[in-house]
Image (spheres, rainbow, N blue to C red):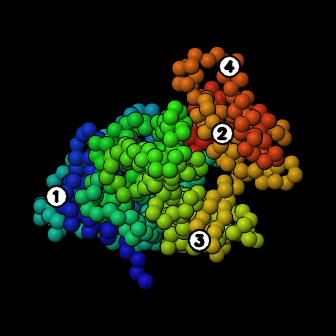
């Protein structure tokens, strides 16, 4: 069976929506599908005459923007392998990734390039500014000449006029390498995940069948495009249908994101749990737990009215036009999820990882089960490495079209992660119910063994702790054979209540007692310690635990 290629989907979308808007930089310029076609052909000309061959690596670093999207698509459709780099990586990490990936060309935002040293990336033939595509550095002497001729000569093969009926992208096979993605991860320095075109195509085909977008629909892109979650579902998928994507070009705070949603009114919203949980804790929880509301929501009929008002307000906060919010990247707090289910809010939990480009499971908000992450997508098989996958937790393993081809230049890591017959060990622990719904218990690397051999999942303890007063976020760990919790307090509330340190610690100790009353004895927390600043996180807002488990 021949599977549709993403490049063919892209070509069709550009031709069909030639005069429609494709991209907008929030508060700035707009690029139509025809302008996108011109830019892709222009960069193809530069690649070809600069000596870039099919399979060569092109690195890319910068915040979400029109030029980021153009560079990614031009590289992908030329047959090069894209190396998208997260803009919050440190300069030494960027140098390392560019070198390790064997990139020969590099596109960098000016502000990031200013902190780099091109001499530490000796294999690059050229570096271009992602701000305006100007040449920042060259090793090949002919490249300035190529650029000087490019503005006119790229149109020669189109008789000096590119129209939708002449637009054609190269044939790229699904087996070809599409991208090498270096995720920041949560366990130390990352590996380069090799994603073939087959992985990208499988993710997008699944989205076409299960997520009802159409051409002209609006999307807000705020997840980092260098991460596979945002790249696949805020960018590549909607683009393949002819949607209009607005990029939030600066690091967005929840306030900016909500403002953009209300202005643009997107048809599909992606979110990480942190955004939803902050809205719940700062806006919803105080409302439903104080005054008369606390008692009224217990009364049949009246509670329905209150819940409908909260639901409507929450939907309007995200623009009011979306068919659902897909939450992924980390686990959603169970208390928050239960409340959202109670008010019939249109959200669903998905599950994935970079090694699957990223999707592993999903289900529509109308049919998804509480606390599950949906069912495995139809482009994958799944199994739980357990004697009884319905009752005994085991490692989640997947196999199929979405799965990576391995880690770049790291055979040992590939052999550790993938079995000889193609099963990917996700590192996540979970259960599978009789209907095929997946329930994640935690990361295998995070699991703590109790004194009597009990399995303790720190994520479950943190979910309870994070909903207690004065707690912004937490990390549970084992120290000197005892369970302790680090918390980053809600300093806004501390300041508002004019608390001194003694009072803060007194209330934190009360939290510990409340927490332990809800936990089995073997997972009781012996001590809570204050951490003075927010925990460092990955792009999908998972805490980098390895920094704190010392």
In contact (CB < 8 Å): disc 2 and disc 3: no
* Number of dots carrying numbers: 4
Q: Is residue 392 above or below residue 134?
A: below
Q: CA gap, disc 4 to disc 1?
A: 62 Å
Residue occupying image coordinates x 71% and y 39%:
515
Please tell me the numbered disc located at residue 503.
Answer: 4
Q: CA gap, disc 2 to disc 3?
A: 30 Å
Please tell me the numbered disc located at residue 436.
Answer: 3
Q: Nearer the viewer, residue 279 or 38?
A: 279
Q: Is residue 125 above or below residue 476?
A: below
Q: CA gap, disc 1 to disc 2?
A: 52 Å
Q: Nearer the viewer, residue 53 or 522?
A: 522
Work out which residue is located at the far bottom of the displayed protein and give it: 1
Looking at the image, is mark 4 or mark 1 nearer the viewer?
Answer: 4
- Quarter of the image where one finds residue 493: top right
Please tell me the numbered disc located at residue 19.
Answer: 1
């Amino acid at each position: 069976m021949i599977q549709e290629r993403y490049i063919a989907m892209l070509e069709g979308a550009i031709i069909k929506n030639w005069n429609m808007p494709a991209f907008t930089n929030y508060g700035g310029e707009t690029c139509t599908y025809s302008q996108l076609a011109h830019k892709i052909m222009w960069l193809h000309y530069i690649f070809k005459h600069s000596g870039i061959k099919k399979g060569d690596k092109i690195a890319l670093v910068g915040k979400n923007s029109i030029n980021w999207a153009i560079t990614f698509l031009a590289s992908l459709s030329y047959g090069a392998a894209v190396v998208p780099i997260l803009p919050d990586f440190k300069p030494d990490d960027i140098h390392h990734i560019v070198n390790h990936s064997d990139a020969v060309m590099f596109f960098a935002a000016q502000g990031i390039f200013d902190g780099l040293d091109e001499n530490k990336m000796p294999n690059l033939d050229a570096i271009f500014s992602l701000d305006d595509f100007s040449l920042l550095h060259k090793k090949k002497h002919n490249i300035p000449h190529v650029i000087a001729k490019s503005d006119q000569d790229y149109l020669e093969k189109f008789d000096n006029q590119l129209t939708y009926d002449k637009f054609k992208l190269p044939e790229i096979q699904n087996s070809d390498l599409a991208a090498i993605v270096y995720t920041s991860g949560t366990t130390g320095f990352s590996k380069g995940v090799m994603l073939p075109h087959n992985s990208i195509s499988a993710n997008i085909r699944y989205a076409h069948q299960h997520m009802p977008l159409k051409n002209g629909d609006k999307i807000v892109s705020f997840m980092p495009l260098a991460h596979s979650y945002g790249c696949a579902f805020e960018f590549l998928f909607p683009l393949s249908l002819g949607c209009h994507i607005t990029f939030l070009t600066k690091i967005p705070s929840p306030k900016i994101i909500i403002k953009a949603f209300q202005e643009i009114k997107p048809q599909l919203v992606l979110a990480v749990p942190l955004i939803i949980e902050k809205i719940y804790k700062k806006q919803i929880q105080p409302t439903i737990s104080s005054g008369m509301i606390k008692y009224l929501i217990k009364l049949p009929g009246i509670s329905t009215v209150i819940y409908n008002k909260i639901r409507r307000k929450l939907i309007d906060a995200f623009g009011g036009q979306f068919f659902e919010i897909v939450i992924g990247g980390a686990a959603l707090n169970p208390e928050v999820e239960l409340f959202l289910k109670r008010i019939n809010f249109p959200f669903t939990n998905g599950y994935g990882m970079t090694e699957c480009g990223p999707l592993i499971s999903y289900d529509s908000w109308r049919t998804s089960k509480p606390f599950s992450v949906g069912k495995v997508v139809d482009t994958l098989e799944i199994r739980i490495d357990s004697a009884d996958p319905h009752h005994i937790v085991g490692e989640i393993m997947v196999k199929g079209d979405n799965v990576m081809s391995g880690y770049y230049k790291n055979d040992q890591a590939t052999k550790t992660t993938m079995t000889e017959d193609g099963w990917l060990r996700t590192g996540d622990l979970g259960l599978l119910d009789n209907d095929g719904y997946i329930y994640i218990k935690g990361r295998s690397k995070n699991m703590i063994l109790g004194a009597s051999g009990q399995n303790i999942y720190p994520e479950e303890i943190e979910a309870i702790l994070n909903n207690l007063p004065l707690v912004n976020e937490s990390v549970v760990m084992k120290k000197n054979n005892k369970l302790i919790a680090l918390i980053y307090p809600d300093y806004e509330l501390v300041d508002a209540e004019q608390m001194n340190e003694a009072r803060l610690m007194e209330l934190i100790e009360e939290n510990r007692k409340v927490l332990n009353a809800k936990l089995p004895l073997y997972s009781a927390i012996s001590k809570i310690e204050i951490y003075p600043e927010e925990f460092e996180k990955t792009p999908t807002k998972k805490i980098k635990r390895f920094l704190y488990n010392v």
